[in-house]
Image (cartoon, rainbow, N blue to C red):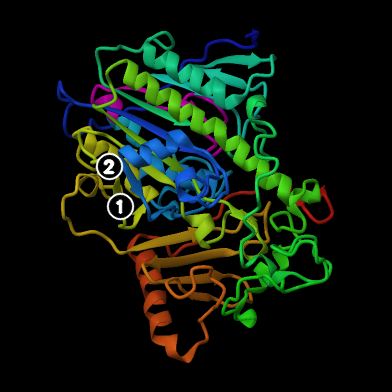
Amino acid sequence: MKISLIAFLLLPVLTVAPPAKKPVASKQKNIIFILSDDHRYDAMGFMNKFAGLQTPNLDRLARNGAHVQNAFVSTALCSPSRASILSGQYAHTHKVVDNFAPLPKNLKFFPQYLQEAGYQTAFLGKWHMGNTGDDPQPGFNYWLSFKGQGVYVNPTFNINGKQVSYTDSSHITDLLTDYAIKWLDGREGGRDTRKPFMMYLSHKAVHANFIPAKRHQGRYANMPINYPPTMYLTATDSSKVFGPSADSPKRTEPADQPKLKVNRAGIPNWVKNQRYSWHGVDYMYHGDIQFNDFYHQYAETLLGVDDSVGRVLKWLEDNGQLDNTLVVYMGDNGFSFGEHGLIDKRHMYEESMRVPMLVHCPGTVKAGTKITQVIQNIDVAPTLMAYAGLSKPAQMQGNSFLPILAGQPIAWKDRAFYEYYWEIDFPQTPTMFGVRNDQYKYIFNYGVWDTNELYDLKADPNEANNLIKSPQHQEIARTLRDQVFDWLEGTGGMQIPLNRVRQKRFDHINKGGY
């Protein structure tokens, strides 16, 4: 590979912080956390959602470890979710409420505790938090990242402060995995192989716009499209995409559409209007790509992530570390593919807030385990620290689900809370707060003249029948609303975080900035 050096070494400055409560024991085990971007909870081969999708390595994790079936993020957006994973806190607590909010100076992430406890730590991939760019961050012995979203082909990396660029058509997913393997080997970054390690591998994939590796391009060009049954609900005669009857452009309710109990009057206006915006199926990213192509390229780009997981597992196997390494795979948020006429994430519908989570650790997790409890991104940091033998810091709002993975009966939460804050760059989606339990989901759309939402997920898994005005459901709606505000009051979330505007607003309708 051809590499050009374009800057000089910039040493990271580590902040002084209190030591972890318990030192690393000599037999402490290793940790690998693999994070993908915009990965839907059902976009894995064994889930049988995407016809013909093959993810043998993700399937292997599920088969030989645990599939966390009810994994959710507390905010379905890159930076807030990533900060919640690292801090164990909700967005209104850690204050990284959007993709441009700065990192608070006193915010401490779980790798810092592991490093203080003697772990060799590495971060490789997408950081994308606050205004930090790609600068090395505290808590990592080895650092490899890139600015913002990065690019799929020929990326430029910041490796421990040194800028390294690629010009030979290298794909970022493969490169990140190459460096990860070299760091594990001790060939990159000077890892002390006598010490336990924690590697945080954070992929750019599968963030839009999708570019699969060359070997995967065209692999799923003929994949059947699994159009969601709610795609047509906000369509009009001028719509480009309807769903199963795309060949009938004037049909607003396709004849072959599965019959749903639908409350059209209960669909929020912001959902109806967004169909023709940047994040809607009829104007996806300025309308420069067709829905079917978008769908196929997503599946093809995901193949590179699955390859990466396989290479990491092979290294662990080849080096005798598979049985004593906790491997966690997770998505930072989900992704809509036409549900409610929407594309992307941010909102609180299932395909946005629900994520894939797989855990592999033969010494702790029995093969074929299915976790049905509600697990959120705020629970990741306490869990990884617990596996390392460290106590949960007081500021973390999540809890360790390690006992659940081990099959131990413990008291556990039965609901997931959610928050999203309006963004100036994508003003179509309002601020919203909500709660989801095993039957109901309540969404409070804040700051807009619109309806709130209540869905019975058991009777209506597609979230097509808004029950917010149903006389029979008023007590349930009040109870869930009270739970949302009790949560916000109890965690210091009653003040809407506001940050200074740091760039011009981009008008996605008129394609201009101001």
Q: Is residue 415 above or below residue 308?
A: below
Q: CA distance from mark 2 to mark 1?
A: 14 Å
Mark 1 residue crowding within 10 angstroms, few (<14) / some (14–19) / many (20+)? some
The spot of residue 57 in percent (x, y) is 44, 33
The stretch drawn in magenta includes residue 121: yes
Left or right: 495 as drawn, with respect to 101: left
Q: Closer to the camera, 212 or 479?
A: 212
Q: Which mark is residue 371?
A: 1
Give the labeled residue for mark 2.
383
- What residue sits 67% from the left and 63% below the top? 341
Q: Is residue 59 above or below residue 478?
A: above
Specify whether residue 126 is in view: no
Q: Is residue 265 above or below residue 401?
A: below
The spot of residue 291 in percent (x, y) is 73, 51
| Among the 4 quarters of the image, the one containing residue 256 | bottom right
- Counting labels gives 2
The spot of residue 193 in percent (x, y) is 29, 12
| Secondary structure at numbered mark 1 | strand
| Highlighted range, magenta | 114-140
Q: Main secondary structure of the magenta part?
A: loop
Mark 2 residue crowding within 10 angstroms, few (<14) / some (14–19) / many (20+)? many
Tag 2: amino acid: Thr
Tag 1: amino acid: Ile
- Whichever of callouts 2 and 1 sits on the residue coming sooner in the sequence is 1
- What residue sits 65% from the left and 11% below the top? 6
Mark 2 touches mark 1? (CB < 8 Å): no
